[in-house]
Image (cartoon, rainbow, N blue to C red):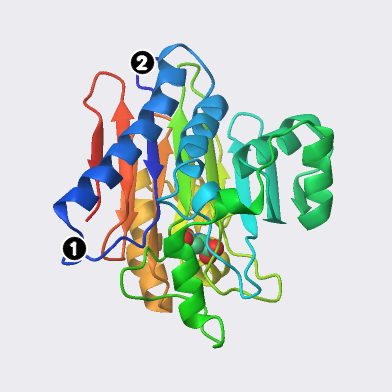
Amino acid sequence: MDNFGIAVHGGAGTLSAVEMTPQEEIIYRKALETATMAGYNVLVKGGSSVEAVEAAVMALENEPLFNAGRGAVYTNSGKHEMDSCIMDGNTLKAGAITGINNVKNPVSLARTIMEQSEYVFLSGKGAEDFAHKMGLAFEPDEYFHTELRHGQWLAVKDTEEVLLDHKKVTKFGTVGAVALDVHGNIAAATSTGGMTNKRYGRIGDSPIVGAGTYAKNNTCGISCTGHGEYFIRAVVAHNISCLMEYKGLSLKEACNKVVMEDLVKMGGEGGLIAIDSQGNMELVFNSEGMYRGWKKNGEELQTGIY
Ligand code: ASP
């Protein structure tokens, strides 16, 4: 099939339009283009949607601008605790991890769990042990240090505040990708450092199958970003798939209902990227902006922020 394509996001917590300088905008757009093309280049060669979303998310994890992998935010104890999930819409297999440190590309660990273990969801030290055993790349703490994220944490570390808002903050900087490949298979992946100053082992929606990430060939692939607690309670990604499967809603109708009606009513800020089996894409958010990029076969590469 020739309606293949990929969409990526770099989080629903953009710098506000008035704070974003033209230079910063160019840097963000370039990073989104690089990630979109990392995934698209896999698809164009006939590679799988799983491979494509992994490649796109790895590019975003390696980019310190975004709250995932290298640019992950700090927890209350001054550490990084990263979460990720990947799902294959063809087999409904999934792999996920939460609360891991020092693994260079959490999305690759999620994929390794999906494809090479008998489990779906691993956490903390156990997940890191599995990553070591499978030969995944590790990096020291310094690799994950960015002045921006460190400064955000220092500003709130002695408070109860979990950073939702901040001057010059990329709140909700999670990354993700959804893709449809030439074989008609859909995949989705999400990766995040979570929220600045989180404590008590807090887990957001990103690594939870059906909340922040979901893929099913006959409906859609979804990757979310936003205030995770609300996305968990609204079971956002699976809910959209169900609205399509059981109520016959289009991708657009289902995404708009969940993001612009249900989440708004609950007070849940954020957005998501979605793709269906026809290659239709939705990049929808109820926040001020969402870093995003997308490319369909035969169409221009596009990026957006607001
Ligand atoms: N959804 C993520 C979480 O709650 C945060 C984000 O999207 O930036 O952990």
Q: Earlier in the sequence, mark 1 or mark 2?
A: 2
Front one among 232 and 203: 203
Q: Nearer the viewer, mark 1 or mark 2?
A: 1
Q: Name the residue under label 1.
A: 17
Kindly identify the amino acid type of the residue bearing the numbered disc 1.
Ala
Kindly identify the amino acid type of the residue bearing the numbered disc 2.
Asp
> Residue at (22%, 56%) from the top-left corner?
306
**Where in the figure is residue 275, as x and y percent of width and height?**
40, 38
> Residue at (50%, 76%) from the top-left corner?
154
Picture layout, residue 125 above or below residue 262: above
Spatial CA span between label 1 and label 2: 36 Å
Picture layout, residue 5 above or below residue 302: above
Of all residues, the one furthest to the top in this rendering is 45
Q: In which quarter of the image is residue 259?
A: bottom left
Front one among 258 and 74: 74
**Where in the figure is residue 111, as x and y percent of width and height?**
67, 35
Q: Mark 2 points at which residue?
A: 2
